[in-house]
Image (cartoon, rainbow, N blue to C red):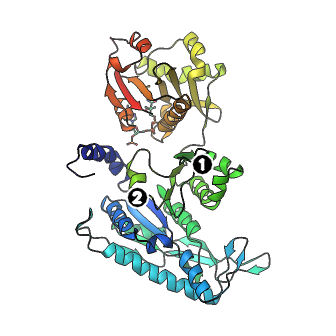
Amino acid sequence: MTENNPQFAQWFRSASPYIRLHRGKTFVIHIEDEAINAESFNELVHDLALLNSLQIRLVLVYSTRHSIEGRLKENKIRLHYHKGVRITDAETLEFVKDAAGKLRIEIESGLSMGLGNTPMSEAEVVVTSGNFVRAKPLGIIDGVDHQFTGAVRSVQVKAINSKLDANEIVLIPPIGYSITGEAFNLEAKALAAEVAIALKAEKLIYLMEAPALKDANEQVVKQLTRLEAEQLLKSDYADAGRLHATLNLATQACAAGVQRVHLVDRSVEGAIVRELFSRDGVGTMISSTSYDALRQATIHDIPGIMELITPLEKQGILIHRSREKLELEIDNYTVMLRDDVIIGCGSLFVFTKEKAAEIACLAIHPDYHNSGRGEQLYLTLVQNAKKAKIKRIFVLTTHTMHWFQELGFKESTLDELPVEKKSLYNYQRKSKILVRDV
Ligand SMILES: CC(C)(COP(=O)(O)OP(=O)(O)OC[C@H]1O[C@@H](n2cnc3c(N)ncnc32)[C@H](O)[C@@H]1OP(=O)(O)O)[C@@H](O)C(=O)NCCC(=O)NCCS
C-alpha cells in the first residue's frame, strides 16, 4: 500500500488510536535466535526501530537456544536435560557466552544500520545492554545438579527504567550474574516474563517461531482472558499443548500484573506492527484485565441490572426499560459479575432475516470504568453475534459515539437498519446510528 492509494489514509487513521495508546508504555519482547539469523531480520529491525521512534519503551530479551543446540551438536557434546530443563555445565556455559555475545552484536548492528530507503530512514536508535539481571543457581533438583543453569533473583528495574527514560532500547541476554560474580544461563522465555513482571510492563510479546494458538477451525484465537487460558491449559486441547510452556508463562505474567501478553508468529509479514496497530491483530492476546465472570443473564439478575442502568436512564444516556421489558428480553442479556455482584451488562438483539444484530444497553459500573471491561463485554456480544452467523452489528447511541467508533463502527443512516427496528426509531431522541461488519 502506497501513499497514492486511498486506502493508505484509511489505514493510517485506523492505526492512529494505537499510536496514542502505546506511547510511553513498556513492552518486553522475546525473540528467538532463529529470528535474528533469519533473512527477514532486517524487516524486524525496522519494525523495532519504528516502535522506538513512537516512544514505546522497548526491552528485548533474546534466546540462544537454537545456536547453542547447533553448536553443541557440531562439537558432538551431548545435551543433558532434567524434566525439560537443560543442564548447563562449565563447557556448555562457554558456548552460551559465545552465542549470547555474537547475537548481541548482530542485534546491535542491525539496529545501528542506516535505515535509508526504509520507513525508518534517519532514525537513530540507541541500544544498551548490561548486568540488568541478578541470578542464582537453580541448584540440585531430585539429586541432579543443574550447575550453571540459573534462575532470576532480581531485575535491576531502576537501571533499566533510566535507560528506557532516555528512549534507549534495552537488550537482555539469557544470562544473569550472581553476587559471587558467576554467570548463569537463564531460560529466555521465563526471563522475559520475569522482566515484564518486574517492570510492570503493559505488554509482554512472544515473537514465536510457531503459529499462534489455533481454534478447532484452524483460525487464530485472537483473544483469551487469563482465566480462559488457564482453563485451556487444564484441558486436553492439542493446540494448547503445543504452546503449553508459552501459554503457561503468559498466564503467570497476567496473574502478576502484566496487562496483556501476545503470542505472535514471527513468520507473518509485519507481524509485530500488525499485532500492535490493527484492531484484530495477527496473534493471540491473553489479557489480565478481568477475572470477572461473564455469563448469560437470568431472571434473577434483573434487580442487579436495574440498579446498574437506572442512573444511566435518569441521565438520558440509556432509554428507560421497565422490569417487564427486561423480563421478556432477559435471554438477550449478558452480565459481568465480580464477587457475584453485577458490574456490567449488555444485550444483543438478532434480526435473523437481515443477518444483523443490535448491541444495546451496554453499561459498566462507574467504579470499573477504563479498565477494558466495556470492550471485553462488547467482544463477548460480538462472539455471540458470530455464533448466530450475523454479518452486521449496529448500535443506537446518544453519548457514546466515539467509544464505538474506536471499535471500528461507522456512522450510518436509518435506511441501514432492519425494517422492524426502523419503525421503532425514536425521532425525538435523535440517537446516532453506528454500524460495523462482524
Ligand atoms: C461505554 C462504557 C460501556 C465503556 O466502559 P469501560 O469499561 O470504561 O470501557 P473500556 O475500559 O473498554 O474503554 C475505556 C476507554 O473508552 C473511553 N470512553 C469511555 N466512554 C466514552 C465515551 N462516551 N465516548 C468516548 N470515549 C469513551 C475512555 O475514555 C477510555 O479511553 P482511554 O483508554 O483512552 O482512556 C461505559 O463508559 C458506560 O457504561 N457508559 C454508559 C453507558 C453507555 O453509554 N452505553 C453505550 C450505549 S449502548
Badge 2 element: loop
Amino acid type at image mark 1: Arg
Q: How crowded is mark 2: few (under 14 residues within 10 Å), some or many (20 or more)?
A: few
Residue 121 occupies which quadrant of the picture?
A: bottom left
Picture coordinates of residue 354, whole percent (x, y): 45, 20
Picture coordinates of residue 161, whole percent (x, y): 42, 66
Q: Quadrant of ligand 1?
A: top left
Residue 107 occupies which quadrant of the picture?
A: bottom left
Residue mark closest to the camera, 2 vs 1:
2
Picture coordinates of residue 415, whole percent (x, y): 33, 17
Residue 428 occupies which quadrant of the picture?
A: top left
All told, the count of numbered labels is: 2
Q: Residue at x 48, y 79 (%)?
A: 131
**Is residue 65 found left or right of 35 in the rendered image?**
right
Task: In the rendered view, tell whether residue 87 sits above or below residue 394.
Answer: below
Picture coordinates of residue 86, whole percent (x, y): 66, 76
Foreground pick, 182 / 219: 219
Foreground pick, 392 / 341: 392
Return the residue at label 2.
Answer: 269
Badge 1 element: helix
Q: Which residue is drawn at 56% across and 24% down?
A: 333
- Viewer can see residue 365: yes
**Is residue 27 found left or right of 252 in the rendered image?**
left
Residue labelled 2 has its Cβ within 8 Å of some atom of ligand 1: no
Amino acid type at image mark 2: Glu
Sequence-earlier tag: 2 or 1: 1
Q: Which residue is drawn at 60% across and 39% down?
A: 292
Q: Which residue is drawn at 60% across and 56% down?
A: 247
Q: Which residue lies furthest to the left in this view?
A: 4
Question: Label 2 vs label 1: CA separation?
Answer: 27 Å
Return the residue at label 1.
Answer: 226
